[in-house]
Image (tube, grey):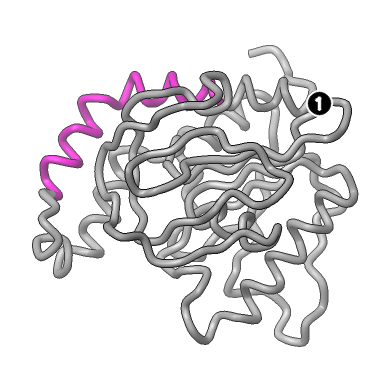
Amino acid sequence: MVADRADSDTGFVGERLEQLGGDLTQLLREDFPADGTPLSAEDADLVLLLGSHHGVVDPGREDVVAAESALVLSCLAEGRPVIAICYGAQLAAHALGGVVDRAEFPEIGWYYVDSHDPALCPPGPWAQYHYDRFTVPAGARGLGESAAGPQGFAVESPDGRLRLVAWQFHPEVTPEVLQRWVDEDADVLPGQGVDAAAIVAEARERSAFAQAEAHSLIDVTLDAMRLVRSPV
């Protein structure tokens, strides 16, 4: 999995992957080779791109974005499946020629997602925490949207196998992770009209359902990627 050092909690998604026999290995963005050496995922059956407090179009991060974009393209070229979440979804869209920019308004909290594919992007409220948006890249299939923009896309091989799925929302997020995020942004959220306490309280109320939804989404995704799932 690819993550920021301070934000590497895979939450409900990682929990399910480990239940199914996965062994998660971290590749931290802060540790990307400074000399431009290509990133390698040759030992991985699946690559998971997590979110980030940074943005794909933030100045000064061009080398990091280029390295991770190259990793996405190499995975697709090698037939290695990719799951991308939030920043990871924006990064994957960028790598494939989509546009990433500032959203008209941020989505922080629980927002309804209109689905074009109820299996890979179930409709309903999902946890969101993003300021940017992406366009669905050419050749990909849009999975859903909200008022802020696209909420997911899929890249499939000619035989229908899912090669990459990207979600703008956060199926992985636990109440504890969401609490940490709002604590880190405590100085800015009130000015954006965000009730941090209410968001976290809703996460705690939804926790069991959100966990079940995330687990089910991973099961469906692995089946579409034709990855063998170990019995639980």
Provide the residue span drawn in magenta. Answer: 196-217
The kind of secondary structure the magenta stretch mainly shows is: helix
Residue found 80% across the figure and 55% down from its top: 41
Question: Is-magenta flag for residue 208?
Answer: yes
Residue found 30% across the figure and 26% down from its top: 207
Q: Is residue 127 left or right of residue 201?
A: right
Q: Residues within 10 Å of mark 1 (few under 14, many from 20)?
A: few
Residue found 52% across the figure and 26% down from its top: 116
* Residue 85: x %, y % from top left: 52, 47
Mark 1, residue position:
160
Question: Is-magenta flag for residue 55?
Answer: no
Q: Which one is nearer the viewer's eye here, 10 or 214?
A: 214
Dividing the image into 4 quarters, which one contains the C terminus? Answer: top right
Q: Is residue 207 left or right of residue 123?
A: left
Q: Is residue 227 left or right of residue 203?
A: right
* Residue 61: x %, y % from top left: 55, 80
* Residue 227: x %, y % from top left: 78, 26
